[in-house]
Amino acid sequence: MYQTLSEALAWASPQLLDVSDTPKLDAEVMLLHIIHKQRGYLYTWPDERLTSEQIDDYTKMVGRRVIGTPIAHIVGEREFWSLPFMVNPTTLIPRPDTEILVETALNLPLAEAAKVLDLGTGTGAIALSLAYEKPSWQITAVDKIIEAVALAKANRSHLKLPQVDIIQSDWFDSVNCYDFNLIVSNPPYIDEEDSHLEEGDVRFEPHSALTAPEHGFADLYHIADCARDYLAPGGYLLLEHGFGQALQLRDKMIELGYENVATVRDFGSNDRCTLG
Ligand code: GLN
C-alpha cells in the first residue's frame, strides 16, 4: 500500500479530494501528527519508512477524514491566534474569522485591569487569546455546556493562563458581576433551517454551538439585551455574527440604546462583528 512518508501522502491525498478543499494539507497534518515532526521533515526525508503501528494509525485517521470528520477532531487540536487549542466534538472548532473579534477587542481603549466577559467560550479560544495578549485583564469565560467548561479549563492549563476565570453559566444566568468593560461573544447565529449544516465538516460540530432560533438572531438579541445590565458605564459589547446579519443586528443594538454601533469586517471582507 505505502511505506514511506511521500508514499503515505500520495496514497491519502486523492482519497480526500471529495471531502476537503485542502487534501494534500490534510494528509500532511495527519502524517505529522503521527510522526511528531514539523512540516519540513516530510520533504527533507520523503523516503523515511513508517513503522507498522504508524501505518495503522495513519490509515485509521485517513479513514475518518474520508467520511468527513474534521481534521481538528482527528488530531485533537486547532491553532487559533497562533496558539494551540485542544478541541473535541462538544464545542465549535475555532475559526480564523473569529480572530478579527480578538483583534478588535485588543484595539479598544481599555484600562490595564479591564474586566472582560466571554459568553459561550467553547474551547476558550477568545478568552484565552485575550488573556495571552493582555495578562492584566480580569477575564471571565462562561459556557452552559459542562464539557465545554472542562475543555476551556484544560486549554487554560495547557496555555498557562490561570488568571482566566471559567464558569458554567447559561449566558448571564450565573454571572454576578455588573461592571464589565467589555463583553464579547461568538454565539450560535446560523439559521436553524440552513441547509449547509448538512454538508461537510460542520456536520460533526454541535448544533447547539451553531444555530439559533429567529433566523439565527435569538442569542445575539438575548445577549445584546441582557448585556446592558452587566456593562460598566462606557463599556463595550462586541458580537460575532453571520455576514448577512450586520444591518439587522446594528438596528437592534441601536434600538436597545447602544451608541457608536459599528460593523467590523473579517479578513475575507465579510461583515463579521458588531461593536457598540
Ligand atoms: N462562522 C461559523 C460557521 O459559519 C459559525 C459560528 C457560529 O455559529 N458562532 O460555521
Image (spheres, rainbow, N blue to C red):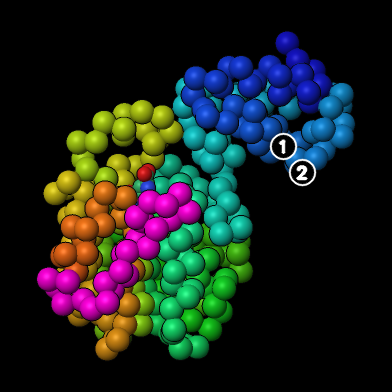
Give the amino acid type for the residue marked by disc 1 in the picture: Leu
Q: What are the residue bounds of the magenta stretch? A: 254-276
Q: Which mark is residue 38?
A: 2
Give the amino acid type for the residue marked by disc 2 in the picture: Gln
Work out whether residue 46 or residue 147 is closer to the camera in this orientation and state it: 46
**Where does the C terminus fall, quadrant-wise?**
bottom left
Mark 1 to mark 2 CA distance (whole Å): 7 Å
Q: Does the magenta portion include 269?
A: yes
Identify the residue at horizontal 22%, vertical 43% (top origin): 191
Work out whether residue 165 or residue 45 is closer to the camera in this orientation and state it: 45
Residue 79 higher or lower than 232, as above or below? above
The answer, for residue 9, to whether it is visible in the render is yes
The answer, for residue 168, to whether it is visible in the render is no
Residue 89 placement: quadrant: top left
* First of labels 1, 2 by sequence position: 1
Question: Label 1, on which residue?
Answer: 32
From the viewer's perspective, tell me whether residue 203 is left or right of residue 63: left
